Amino acid sequence: MIDLRALREDPERLRASQRARGEDETVVDTLLSLDERRRSALTGFERLRSEQKSFGKSVSRASGDERQALLDRAKELAQQVKDAEAEADRVGGELDALLRVVPNLIEEGAPPGGEQDFVVLEHVGAPPEFDFEPRDHLELGEGLRAIDMERGAKVSGARFYFLTGVGARLQHALFNLAMDQAVEAGFVPMTPPVLVKPEAMEGTGFLGAHAAEVYRLPQDDLYLVGTSEVPLAAYHMNEIIDELPRRYVGWSTCFRREAGSYGKDTRGIMRVHQFDKVEMFSYCDPADSHEEHLRLLAWEKEMLAKVEIPYRVIDVAAGDLGTSAARKYDCEAWVPTQNTYREVTSTSNCTEFQARRLSVRHRGEDGKNHPVATLNGTLATTRWIVSILENHQQADGSVRVPKALQKYIGLEVLEPVKR
């Protein structure tokens, strides 16, 4: 959540952030009003409680009619204290509830606007030119006996699939490459749980605008994660971290309902309900978060270079940022049969927003505890298979394996399987 002290000192910054996101900026005035009312109520409560304590000493020294009058006043004062405390709690509850739904302050420089208002920062690599009609990833995958959508639907329903044979091997090769790169860069490898408590899901900001995309097990009051960002962010929940930065990389299965996206990318494995992902996660000093964000982006670009895919980097517009993100960069890989770029990595700087909600702190040079900054970034997902197959396909339906993956999969070319 946002910092109330910073809001009091510079309310215009949140107003500007809300405008850039296309959100209601009048929430700033509501927050300031509630904050003032809560502080006033707390002041009144403390004053009455102090008076009550002093009054108690007067009662003990009095006698007769004076004592009875003081007892009556003490009873009245006790009710006033109780009412004042209830009022402070009520207003505080309203303030906390509103703070929970206000998105993070965007970073200076993030482009304003909605989904289509992103800024292209760079193009890397040239789209391949084919002297044949390119096949899409599903046609290639079926020819390689690498993707089986039909049996995925039979077993689990629409938007489920099997990766089979070289398809499964390709994903394992890709993820092992990603994990090796991350470990070499100093990340601690993690296999996180994929079921989390409500406080972990809510604390990372996934139960707001995107709650409809989250799978919940009501009988157990647990949520299936859509990214290992959630368990990795909650790993140090309610803790004080003694050394920064802390970098973790998680390999996990992820689940998303994809609510509201029906009719979009229903063919193949571009937009599915279950997929695997390797996710980087960093806890760092807030003063270092901008540079840490650029480091995460550089590691994503390093992975894309290894699989030899043309891509572009975009600076995501404020209105398309998630609740927790102050800024986000996406890498979008070229998909030949769609003649466009599609997102394959995303890295977000969440500044102190998640850490405040999850109570993750570090001890500063002043000896006080302060919220850390949290950042996340994709290093590989199942979706990468789409671009790998399509960009490296050959006329006979075979697919060239990028050199960096060859030692992991043990093949230089994926050959079609004769039926």
Image: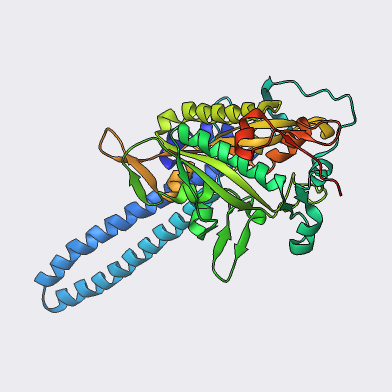
Residue 105 x %, y %: 53, 36
Foreground of the two, 211 or 35: 211
What residue lies at 68% left-to-right and 30% top-to-bottom? 402
- Regarding residue 97, the answer to whether it shows in the image is no
Foreground of the two, 416 or 124: 416
Check the image and report above or below for 129 versus 303.
above
Q: Name the quadrant containing residue 51.
A: bottom left
What residue lies at 26% left-to-right and 60% top-to-bottom? 49
Residue 214 x %, y %: 63, 56
Check the image and report above or below for 104 versus 218.
above
Q: Name the quadrant containing residue 125.
A: top right
Q: Is residue 41 left or right of residue 101?
A: left
Residue 75 x %, y %: 27, 73
Total marks placed: 0
Check the image and report above or below for 119 versus 279.
above
What residue lies at 68% left-to-right and 21% top-to-bottom? 124
Foreground of the two, 400 or 287: 400
Q: Is residue 45 left or right of residue 417?
A: left
Q: Is residue 347 left or right of residue 70?
A: right
Q: Give the image's coloring scheme.
A: rainbow
- Regarding residue 5, the answer to whether it shows in the image is yes
Foreground of the two, 22 or 287: 287
Residue 50 x %, y %: 23, 58
